[in-house]
Amino acid sequence: MGDLQKGEQQCNMDYIFASSVQNVRLHLLTISYDVCCQWFTNFWTQQKFLPPHLLLVFPNSGIQAKVPKFHLSSHVKKCHAPFSLGYTLGASRTDGEGVEQNWDELNGQRPSTKEMGPGSRWDTLDDCCGHVNWRKTIGLDHRQSSLEEMLEAIPQALRSRKDFIVFEEYLHEEDNDQVMQWEAEVAAWTEDESLPDPYCVPPSDMTLAQVHLMLAEEDKKLVEEG
């Protein structure tokens, strides 16, 4: 958390983010922020203006910046694939919305904290966040445990994997060349997102009425052929 002067400006967000990860030593870090598509696009060119002790040791490819799933749907189409957690290696089923959930508690602190000085405001908000996290911790006994969730998820994952393999084999049988082309395009785009986006479906000029007509003609043909 950090103070803002007016809105979520690039300089503020750069400073807050760099401060939060300055001691992190990982090969890969995935972060979520509702306007990552605007902020992180310029981060690496702007971070040189940060204080020396905040300059990151991560390589450019060591940070995956994504948009939380709930927020992503309101973005323009060109944001969807590059900033989707669904297409992010290692993200699993993460929704990225955990960073947003404290606002329900923090909004109630606004009337009092806006009258405080910096130190009191920071301490109050830290205490509020700590309270939320503690409630989450002690509430784990009343929810499904992580072990129970894992034991439920493993057979589901195995079943889904089996279904996927069957479906993939069917696609290869139907049109192997097309599938190989798709896989090559996805692999290339994953390495370099400046290439054409394989997940972006071109808009269709076909109307719903035309689709209904086409399906009706196919049904008629099947009936005539017996």
Image: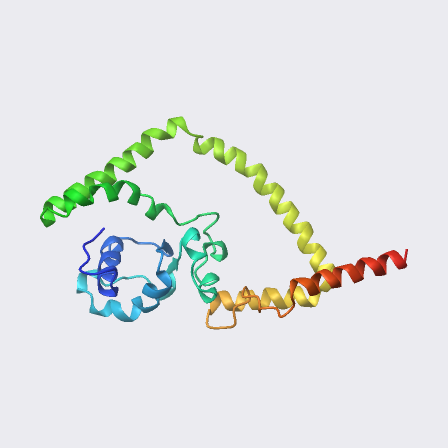
Which x, y percent locates residue 61?
39, 64
Q: Is residue 72 above or below residue 114?
A: below
Residue 50 sits in quarter: bottom left
Residue 26 sits in quarter: bottom left
Mark count: 0
Between 202 and 53, the residue placed more toward the observer is 202
Which x, y percent locates residue 98?
36, 45
Which x, y percent locates residue 171?
70, 58
Q: Is residue 83 left or right of residue 107?
A: right
- The figure's colour scheme reads rainbow
Q: Extreme front residue here?
A: 209
Q: Is residue 213 left or right of residue 195?
A: right
Residue drawn at (66%, 55%) of the image: 168
Q: Is residue 171 left or right of residue 110?
A: right
Residue 28 sits in quarter: bottom left
Between 34 and 88, the residue placed more toward the observer is 34
Residue drawn at (69%, 68%) of the image: 177
